[in-house]
């Protein structure tokens, strides 16, 4: 999976400690250290992530679907058209990446997205992004 670049400001002592670990072969490079540190820091927050993925005021019915994930989700034109035929609306919560295929008409996306909260990245056209932001 493609990664995102993040800048971090460290003082000289912290950077020196990381460089020493790299020099000793504990980590391949500074980036490996930062990825390991981020993963370790995230380990204690499973409950926070679980709570985010839970519905708030969502009323389950035959025409509403909860979409909850940590990772990557892609909305395709075929899937959106199927939802429209079945009169289903989505309540989307994602920690990670939401990809929206470019060939999905904006009106079709608007018809199926009831609510949307994404922590991470959206790969979509500006029009699709605007629809998702309006659904928050």
Image (tube, rainbow, N blue to C red):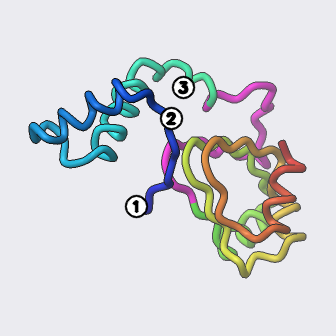
Q: CA distance from mark 3 to mark 2?
A: 30 Å
Examine the structure image and report whether residue 129 is included in the region drawn in magenta.
no
Q: Along the horizontal axis of the image, is 27 left or right of 88?
A: left
| Residue 81 vertical placement versus 73 (above, below) | below
Q: Which residue is mark 1?
A: 1
Front position in the image: 40 or 24: 24
Location of the C terminus by quadrant is top right
Question: Which circle's residue, 3 or 2, is located before the other in the chain?
Answer: 2
Query: Viewed as shown, does residue 93 lie left or right of 39?
Result: right
Element marked by disc 2: loop
**Local SS, label 1:** loop
Q: Write the residue at 80% across / 31% down.
A: 59
Reply yes or no: does residue 69 show up in magenta: yes
* Dot 1 crowding, Cα within 10 Å, few <14, some 14–19, many 20+: few
Mark 3 secondary-structure assignment = helix
What span is in magenta? Answer: 53-73
- The residue positioned 55% from the left and 47% from the top of the image is 96
Residue 50 badge: 3
Q: Which mark is residue 9?
A: 2
- Please tell me whether mark 3 or mark 2 is closer to you in this view: 2
Q: Which circle's residue, 2 or 1, is located before the other in the chain?
A: 1
Alpha-carbon span between mark 3 and mark 1: 23 Å
Where residue 131 sits, quadrant-wise, is bottom right
Position of the N terminus by quadrant: bottom left
Q: Nearer the viewer, residue 40 or 16?
A: 16
Quadrant assignment, res 126: bottom right
């Amino acid at each position: 999976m493609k990664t995102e670049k993040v800048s971090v400001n460290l003082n000289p002592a912290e950077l020196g400690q990381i460089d020493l670990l790299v020099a000793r072969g504990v980590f391949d490079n500074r980036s490996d250290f930062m990825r390991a540190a981020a993963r370790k820091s995230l380990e204690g927050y499973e409950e926070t992530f679980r709570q985010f993925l839970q519905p708030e005021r969502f009323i389950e019915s035959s025409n509403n679907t909860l979409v909850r994930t940590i990772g990557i989700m892609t909305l395709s034109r075929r899937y959106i058209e199927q939802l429209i035929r079945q009169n289903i609306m989505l309540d989307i919560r994602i920690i990670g990446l939401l990809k929206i295929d470019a060939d999905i008409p904006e009106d079709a996306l608007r018809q199926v997205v009831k609510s949307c909260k994404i922590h991470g990245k959206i790969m979509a056209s500006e029009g699709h992004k605007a629809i998702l932001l309006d659904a928050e």
